[in-house]
Image (cartoon, grey):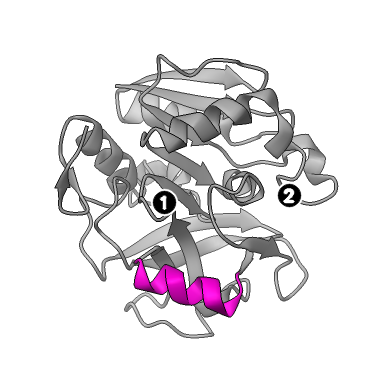
């Protein structure tokens, strides 16, 4: 399997993702410059965190127009897996690959901390090795992580099981106290209707080694690898 990590001007988690995939997970990984015009040789695309184009206008708003994003949209529409982490999540919403938008954290401050997220949908390529209700400890580092979507779209998302992660307590309770940024209904990650595009604010690439404080992020990357090897996601045979 070959993973491509997109690098926008201002990305600062591309190296983290590359390290997690290549050095920890043992996968073939390559950086993709934002002006690339082909993704044909890749099996999965990662949009990393950071401050693409300095987060001018709003997070992800300029990166959405990078040449590579035309190819990312085509890649996603072909059914291949795309994961956007933090700023990458922003880019996916700006590109229309995921519903919703990000608002400033409710405390109007940048938050860097470990949080707990509950797996709400284990039937995606990114969570196939998780179990529904499983709690993961994953770090966050963002200012614009307050997920919002209108009520009609949220209802459709719930019906389609598109909410993949919610912020929770260590015991798995969905509470306002466990919501670090004010995100609507504690949403920490969502997927598209087809399930092959995931956006999440927490950083799984930052918790793949014990020296970093935990390894809960490994299950997300291993789920993708399992999917690409022909495992199951959403109850269907994959690739």
Q: Is residue 48 left or right of residue 75?
A: right
Q: Considering the image in quadrants, where does the N terminus appear? A: top left
* Whether residue 18 is situated above or below residue 201 in the rendered picture: above
Q: Determine the secondary structure under disc 2.
A: loop
**From this viewpoint, is residue 15 visible?**
no
* Whether residue 1 is situated above or below residue 83 in the rendered picture: above
Q: Which residue is mark 2?
A: 59
Q: Determine the secondary structure under disc 1.
A: loop
Q: Considering the image in quadrants, where does the C terminus appear? A: top left
Prevailing SS of the magenta stretch: helix
Q: Residue at x 36, y 41 (%)?
A: 209
Quarter where residue 47 is shown: top right
Label 2 or label 1, whichever comes before in sequence order: 2
Magenta stretch holds residue 153: yes
- Given residues 36 and 23, the one toward you in this image is 36
**From this viewpoint, is residue 39 visible?**
yes
Q: Is residue 149 left or right of residue 225?
A: right
The magenta region covers 149-160
Q: Which residue is mark 1?
A: 213
Q: Residue at x 44, y 68 (%)?
A: 157
Q: Report the Cα–Cα distance between label 2 and label 1.
A: 28 Å
Residue 171: % across, % down: 32, 79
Q: Residue at x 63, y 50 (%)?
A: 90
Magenta stretch holds residue 220: no
- Within-10-Å neighbours for mark 2: few <14, some 14–19, many 20+: many
Residue 187: % across, % down: 49, 69
Quarter where residue 109 is shown: bottom right
């Amino acid at each position: 399997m070959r993973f491509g990590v997109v690098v926008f001007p201002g990305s600062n988690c591309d190296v983290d993702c590359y390290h997690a995939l290549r050095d920890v997970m043992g996968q073939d990984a390559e950086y993709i410059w934002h002006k690339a015009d082909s993704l044909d040789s890749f099996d999965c695309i990662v949009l990393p965190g950071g401050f693409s184009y300095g987060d001018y206008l709003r997070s992800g708003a300029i990166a959405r127009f990078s040449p590579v994003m035309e190819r990312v949209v085509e890649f996603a529409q072909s059914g291949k897996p795309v994961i956007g982490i933090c700023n990458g999540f922003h880019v996916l919403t700006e590109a229309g690959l995921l519903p919703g938008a990000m608002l400033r954290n409710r405390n109007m401050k940048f938050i860097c901390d470990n949080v707990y997220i509950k797996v709400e949908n284990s039937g995606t390529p990114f969570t196939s090795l998780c179990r529904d209700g499983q709690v993961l400890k994953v770090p966050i580092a963002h200012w614009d992580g307050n997920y919002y979507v209108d009520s009609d779209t949220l209802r459709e998302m719930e019906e389609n099981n598109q909410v993949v992660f919610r912020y929770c307590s260590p015991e798995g309770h969905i509470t306002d106290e466990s919501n670090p940024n004010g995100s609507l209904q504690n949403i920490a990650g969502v997927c598209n209707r087809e399930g092959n595009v995931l956006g999440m604010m927490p950083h799984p690439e930052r918790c793949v080694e014990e020296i970093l404080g935990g390894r809960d992020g490994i299950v997300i990357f291993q789920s993708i690898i399992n999917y690409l090897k022909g495992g199951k996601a959403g109850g269907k045979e994959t690739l």
